Amino acid sequence: MSNRFGVWAAAGACLASLAYGVPQVLQVLGILHDPWDRIFIFAPSLVLAPLFVFTMVAVHVAAPPARSVFSLSALALAVMYAVLVSIVYITQLGVVIPHDLNGEGDSVAFLACCEQHQFTTGLDLLGYTFMSVSTLLAAPAVASQRSRWWLVANGVLAPFLVAQLAWPVLIWVGALWLITFPVAMAVLVLDFAGSQTGKALPR
């Protein structure tokens, strides 16, 4: 049951991250414009938050007892990530964007995201830093080498995420998340599915 849960949770997290990544790229290319760029970026990001927590729950349940300290730490950071970014995204979708559309954006400008030195930008970057460290801690708890590699690849991005508060240019390094995270989730799907069917996982 836990492996089946892990398949669906990790698959959902993978799809949600891709659903975020596509409009993000389209925004950068100037194809997707306001307010639809923000809506299509923030909505799947809000969905991703609980799905990542569920994925880490499945990782923790599947972890051997000797490695459960790593998986439980990963789960704790996943919850911290989800709380922080959920506050940011529901605020954008439910408060900031509606006020902007009504021509009242100045009254809630202090809640807007995601420019440098904005309050919610700090919350967002801290949240994704916690997510990256979560995947780094989850790596020792999973069975297959391929999952460990991709979880670590996502995890090492953590310093480049939080450091964007001081050096926004690091966003181009942090943007590697668009690759490392969905691939890590996709590989976890394969590993959970392999465990569910009783097939040996590649190590």
Image (cartoon, helix red, strand yellow):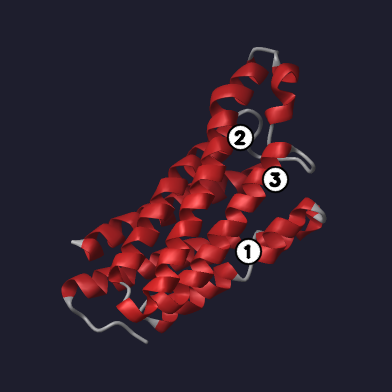
Q: Which mark is residue 62?
A: none
Is the Cβ of the residue at disc 2 closer than 8 Å to that at disc 3? Answer: no
Q: At label 1, which amino acid type do we have? A: Leu
Q: Quadrant of the N terminus?
A: bottom left
Is the Cβ of the residue at disc 1 closer than 8 Å to that at disc 2? Answer: no
Residue 140, compared with residue 78, is above or below; it is below
Residue 108 x/y as whole percent:
70, 22
In this view, the residue in front, 163 or 30, is 163
Q: CA distance from mark 1 to mark 3?
A: 19 Å
Q: Residue at x 29, y 61 (%)?
A: 7
Q: CA distance from mark 2 to mark 3?
A: 17 Å
Residue 19 x/y as whole percent:
48, 47
Find disc 2 in the rendering and name its residue: 38
Find disc 1 in the rendering and name its residue: 176
Q: Within 10 Å of the Cα at label 2, are there few (<14), some (14-19), or many (20+) other Cα atoms?
A: many
Secondary structure beneath disc 2?
helix
Find disc 3 in the rendering and name its residue: 122
Q: Residue at x 70, y 14 (%)?
A: 104
